[in-house]
Image: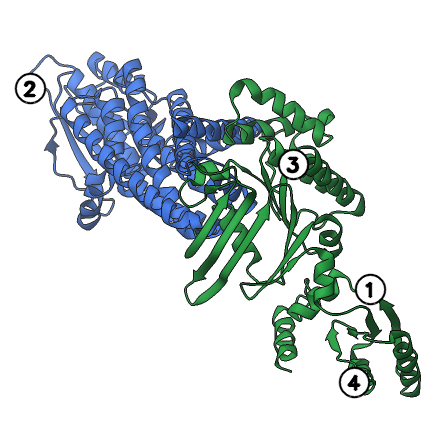
Chain colours: A blue, B green
Amino acid sequence: MGLARDTYTLFLRELLIFKKNLGVNIARSLIFPILFIILLGAFGSSPKNIPVALVNYDNGLTSLQFINLLQSGDSIKIVSSTTQQAAMGMLAQGNVAAVIVIPNGFSSSQLPKPDIYMYLDNSQPQSASVINMVVNRVAAQMGTQITSASTALADPVSTPVPVVTNYAYGAASNYESFVVGGIVIMVAAFGSVFSSGFTVLSDRELGNLKAFLTTPINKFAILLSKIGYGTMQSLLSAYIGLAIGLALGATVAAGFLGVLELIWIIFLVGLSFGSLSIALAMRAKQLQTYALIGQSIVMPAAFLGGAFVPVSLLPPLLQTVSIANPLTYAVNAVRDIMIKGSLPIGDLVLDSAVLLVFAGLMLALAFVFFKNTSEQIS
Amino acid sequence: MPLQNEYAIEIENLVKKFGDLTAVNGISLKIKKGEIFGLLGPNGAGKSTTINMLLGLLSPTSGKISVNGINMLKEPEKAKGQIGIVTQETVVEPELTAEDNLMIFGRLYQIPADELQKDIDFALKLSDLESFRKAYAGTFSGGMKRRLETAKALMHTPQVLLLDEPTTGLDVQNRSKIWNLLRKINKEQNVTILMTTQYLEEADQLCNRIAIIDHGKLIALGTPSELRQKIGMSTVLEVEADKDSLQKVEQIFRKIGLDPRISGNKVFAAGGAKPVEKVERILKLLSAGKIDAHNISMHEPTIDDVFLKLTGSAVRDETGDFKGGRQSAMLGRGR
């Protein structure tokens, strides 16, 4: 009763200070997602207009249809239509990322259709995978069997491998959705770490913490208001990040309901990292130390959680670490919602449960550290 | 069951240890309701530790504290509600307006919502900040901040006001404003005031009673005039000179049968009988020894003198050389 009122009062104080610095606070929430999205090269770089050379031995109606379909998304741009020899030369010099060969008789009604050959420059795996994906999709659309060959440039001789592509999930997804899912979780963790623990320390330096402790309140009201403020900042940062991501092309497969579902996941991340940051602040005692430790926790946790690179691509040792990393589950939950459409539901329950346990542990840790250290604040 | 308590603050056998260090070593004090009480002591004497225990920030190793008869250890929240605080380092929220500063602390001091606005208006008037109610406290001058903080401490009409060096760093004008404010609330609202200060003349002028603590122990307690009598100095003889000449001046004092002490660039001693004659002899000896004295005086003992005599060090370390001050204090005692 008293605790709730005092917590509200102190939370109100945080809001008033937040309001005073509204511009700075919003700017801070904007800078992180924008910076990371750009730095990660997700947007405005390779996945759009990747240059490709075309060799067309067919020149029939169906081949023209195929070419049109290839260029219908913005991913691939056919920059040259030439002989195979000239095209391979362009590939060797890095002027194009792939050479696509349409064989003679492609337009004839004879079945099976002859294989399409594709020479990929895999020294740029990102564009190679995009081209591979697009060509496969178009080929599937046209009922054509595609033969692809990753070209190590030293070994242009290719062995044709038939590819069967089946998107079980996320057929409509793109790299934007993948990266934004990770960024949302990272900025959520940063949001609370740089609000909860950070303001505990700055309040301590200014003497405010001591002033609060001399008032007739339950001292845990201070702790709870700080965690509440951090969680609020997490939600704000994450949703600003999400909005920027959506504006730049990310999608949420689960739709508007998914956007609401995200509140729960981000709330748990904010709560746990806010609590953790307060435990840290009670020990660090100096803003510089705190900022250093805070960053060296959040950044690796986000990375190992698969925020930028899928966990399955990490080295085996780091994959093991990822299992114990709560952010793995948060990132996974967000991806389920944004890419898979929050199905299968069992995954989301597991992710929530792990995060809930972690939040409980961190909250307990914050309580213990706050209780033990608040005597030293005077 | 408990009788209407005549004491605002009772401290019994208070002890606080930090590991091997005993910061407060068995202090007992009873401060009457309506008193203005000064707590003095050199740096590291245990003043702040005592104050922090009174504020409920530190829990004592042993001993008892009660405020208006409420046990601080058993009912800390209730006891804290009786106290208003003005701390050494001015604490106002720079990023809140004057009004919001008061609103937040009013709520924390459990002022009911329907009385809050009235109390805020009262506090703004008391601190002479009515026209700045919407201004951010960060834009205030040092004096305005201190006034706001004092008003904040008084808003919930506490029975006891605790001031930790309330006028440190303030100019003369703001200092006298604070003094007047303290006298006023003490008289009109019968608020008990417990203050620490570095300015001994402040304690002399404001306080009804003074306690001096050193090495965690209470070494003197009484009204300012009682303390002056206690040190047995009817008059004080004092010579100010260059540091190099202080030893020679000290020898002169001894030569005419005085018991001198050195503090800063001063040599001083109790005048005893016929002090004027002694001044004459000191003057002669100084000029004979070609010692260049800056100032020679004979005056009634001040609280400064009491403090020097009892603790052997000045209340403020003017050079900031804490250790040196304490060492010379020890040597003084050894004699």
Res A116 seen here: no
> For the image shown, how many numbered marks are present on the structure?
4
Q: Nearer the viewer, residue A109 or B42?
A: B42
Image quadrant in which you'd find residue B45:
bottom right
Residue B255 locus on image (x, y percent)? 81, 87
Residue A112 numbered tag: 2
Q: Is residue A11 above or below residue B295?
A: above
2 vs 4, front mark: 4
Q: Residues within 10 Å of mark 3 (few under 14, many from 20)?
A: some
Q: Are marks 1 and 3 on the same chain?
A: yes
Q: Secondary structure at mark 3?
A: loop
Q: Residues within 10 Å of mark 4 (few under 14, many from 20)?
A: few
Q: CA distance from mark 3 to mark 2?
A: 105 Å
Q: Which residue is mark 3?
A: B190
Q: CA distance from mark 1 to mark 3?
A: 32 Å
The quarter of the image holding the N terminus of chain A is top left
Q: Secondary structure at mark 1?
A: loop
Q: Which residue is mark 1?
A: B300
Residue A283 locus on image (x, y percent)? 40, 51
Q: Secondary structure at mark 4?
A: helix
Q: Secondary structure at mark 2?
A: loop
Q: Is residue B192 above or below residue A267?
A: below
Q: Which amino acid type is shown beneath numbered disc 2?
A: Pro
For this view, does B245 lie left or right of residue A297? right
Q: Earlier in the sequence, mark 1 or mark 3?
A: 3
